[in-house]
Image: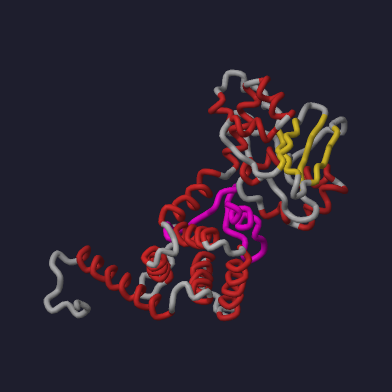
Amino acid sequence: MTVEPAVAAMTGVSAVPRSNGELVFEEPWHARVFGLAVALVGERELAWEEFQGRLVDEIGRWQEAHATDPNAEYHYYERWACALERLVLDLYLVSADELEAAIRSVGIDDAHEHLHEHRRSPPAGGGNER
Amino acid sequence: VTHTGDSSVDGPEIRSRALESLLYEKGLLDPDAVDAVIGSFERGYGPLNGARVIAHAWTDPAYRRRLLDDAPAAVAELGFREGEQLVALANTADVHNVVVCTLCSCYPWTMLGLPPRWYKDPSYRSRVVIEPRSVLAELGLELGEDVEVRVWDSNSELRYLVVPERPQGTDEMTEEELVGLVSRDSMIGVARASSPVDA
């Protein structure tokens, strides 16, 4: 796969977090979204710069928005995820409506699991049920 | 593990999972391809690969010769494939090799993983060529005046792998144990292999 050396060679703000030569993922979903972008760019035969440019933009946008907020927590892979959304929308691989519908659907599934974890039985009349 | 605290319905994790399932549903991406990418970055690349090559060279003199003669073929014997032309450089009591890429950040990353940040630092790239002894000393590696320092400049056609000297007092160690003594920095040439006492 020709994408991987380009991923490894990123410098500056877009450089992937690493420790002793290994990638560092703070959370499992960071590894997923990393793999998603690299695989998508590879499968669609895009130039890695298509993604990297958007990543740099997203990081810059975040830094500008939080420049005066000392409590803002920067997470590289959150910017990465935003850049990936941008890419698929810009390339018309996915429409904004489709994406929002999918997000609602995942969010609702999660809310259900949450209820089941914390309560023995679902609440009567369950507000979010359809 | 740092939690982002984003478990809200449109938090980045949920958005990312939604996008993932959408890409699969639309047939734009194969889940296996994503697994393969993550697996190759987590297991296929990294300093452990280089360390295995070095430890094997320490324990098998014939392999060491093959590694120094034809590094791409020798690393392939152990199942590794460094895409670019790879050259192995042996450190000895008299000669110390150190690697830089003065133009950019060429690096044998299949063997060593992702380069450390300082490797791309303009100050390392320029100074190690001019005053390698001082730069190495600043990085914690003091070399005797009688040791010849050779600085190798990588480029897109040539990548270098330093074969550090096998530390003293390791005669009884197995190859697998020796792997643990080979740090990334020792294969760039800015450190020695760890001694069994430090490791």
Q: Is residue A130 left or right of residue B110?
A: left
Q: Could you say where residue B45 lies in the image, as x and y percent from the top left?
A: 57, 45
**From where the camera sits, is residue B13 visible?**
no
Q: Residue at x 52, y 74 (%)?
A: A91
B168 or B113: nearer the eye? B113
Split into 4 quadrants, where in the image is the C terminus of chain B?
A: top right
B99 or A55: nearer the eye? A55
Q: Could you say where residue A107 lies in the image, as x and y percent from the top left?
A: 32, 72
Q: Eyeballing the image, is A105 above or below B151?
A: below
- Is residue A4 highlighted in magenta? yes
Split into 4 quadrants, where in the image is the N terminus of chain B?
A: bottom left
Q: Residue at x 66, y 51 (%)?
A: B116
Which of the 4 quarters of the picture holds residue A110?
bottom left
**From where the camera sits, is residue B52 visible?**
yes
Q: Could you say where residue A14 lies in the image, as x and y percent from the top left?
A: 62, 65
Which of the 4 quarters of the picture holds residue B196?
top right
Q: Could you say where residue B172 lies in the image, as x and y percent from the top left?
A: 58, 18
Q: Eyeballing the image, is B144 above or below B132?
A: above
Q: Is residue A123 left or right of residue B6?
A: left
Q: Which residues are magenta?
A: A1-29
Q: Residue at x 17, y 77 (%)?
A: A126
Q: Residue at x 47, y 72 (%)?
A: A93
- Is residue B131 highlighted in magenta? no
